[in-house]
């Protein structure tokens, strides 16, 4: 009986651990001119670019996809440069779906829900860049 319990515990631990290691990929289109509308108060709204990339003095990069903020920490990971053919094997996630999961599990610390999150940016016709990012809580 003890062996069965230990086996069940070991299997459940392995399953839960492997789920936390799942990599999630989001597309970041820095060439896009698309905008979204957001409310600024008093019933007024403004338009803002959907994809914004800011490079900080320390080398960190802040990415915004609509009202969500992702940070690439220059000192913690390297940027992975890949051939465009790599896009064929990546399964991209939908930000809305990920956001629903974050809101259910831990809305203040989205990086804890998805610790292995990557933004993929196409920089030319033959190369993409993969950034391991931390999804941070952000209020504009």
Image: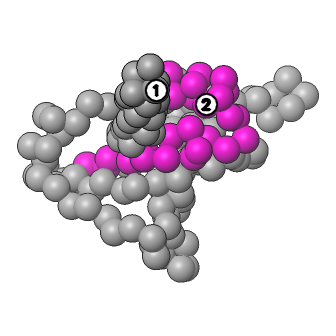
Local crowd size for mark 1, using a 10 Å CA cut-off: few (<14), some (14–19), many (≥20): few
**Residue 43: quadrant of the picture:** top right
Residue 116, numbered label: none
Residue that sits furthest to the front in the current view: 1
Magenta highlight on residue 116: yes
- In the structure shown, which secondary structural element does the residue marked by tag 2 occupy? helix
In the displayed structure, 125 sits above or below 36; it is: below
In the displayed structure, 15 sits above or below 73; it is: above
Instruction: Quote the CA–CA distance across marks 2 and 1.
Output: 37 Å
Residue 120, given in percent of the width and then of the height, sits at 32, 47
Residue 78, given in percent of the width and then of the height, sits at 33, 69
Name the residue carrying label 2. 102
Q: Image point 61% across, 41% down: which residue? A: 110
Instruction: Report the quarter where the N terminus lies.
Output: top left
Local crowd size for mark 2, using a 10 Å CA cut-off: few (<14), some (14–19), many (≥20): some
Q: Which residues are magenta?
A: 97-122
* Image colouring: one colour
Q: Give the mark toward the camera: 2 or 1.
A: 1
Q: Image point 65% across, 29% down: which residue? A: 105
Name the residue carrying label 1. 2
**Residue 15: quadrant of the picture:** top left
In the displayed structure, 4 sits above or below 133; it is: above
Residue 112, given in percent of the width and then of the height, sits at 59, 44
Q: Image point 59% across, 22% down: which residue? A: 100
Whether residue 137 is visible to the viewer of this picture, yes or no, is yes
Q: Image point 81% across, 28% down: which residue? A: 44
- In the structure shown, which secondary structural element does the residue marked by tag 1 occupy? helix
Circle nearer the N terminus (2, 1): 1
- Of residues 84 and 97, which is closer to you in this image? 97
Residue that sits furthest to the right in the current view: 42
Magenta highlight on residue 38: no
């Amino acid at each position: 009986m003890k062996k069965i319990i230990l086996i069940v515990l070991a299997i459940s631990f392995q399953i839960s651990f492997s789920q936390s290691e799942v990599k999630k990929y989001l597309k970041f289109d820095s060439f896009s001119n698309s905008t979204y509308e957001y409310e600024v108060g008093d019933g007024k709204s403004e338009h803002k670019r959907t994809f914004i990339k800011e490079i900080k003095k320390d080398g960190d990069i802040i990415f915004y996809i609509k009202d969500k903020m992702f940070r690439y920490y220059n000192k913690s990971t390297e940027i992975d440069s890949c051939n465009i053919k790599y896009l064929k094997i990546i399964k991209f996630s939908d930000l809305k779906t990920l956001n629903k999961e974050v809101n259910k599990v831990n809305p203040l610390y989205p990086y804890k829900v998805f610790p292995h999150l990557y933004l993929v940016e196409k920089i030319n016709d033959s190369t993409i860049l993969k950034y391991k990012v931390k999804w941070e809580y952000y209020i504009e």
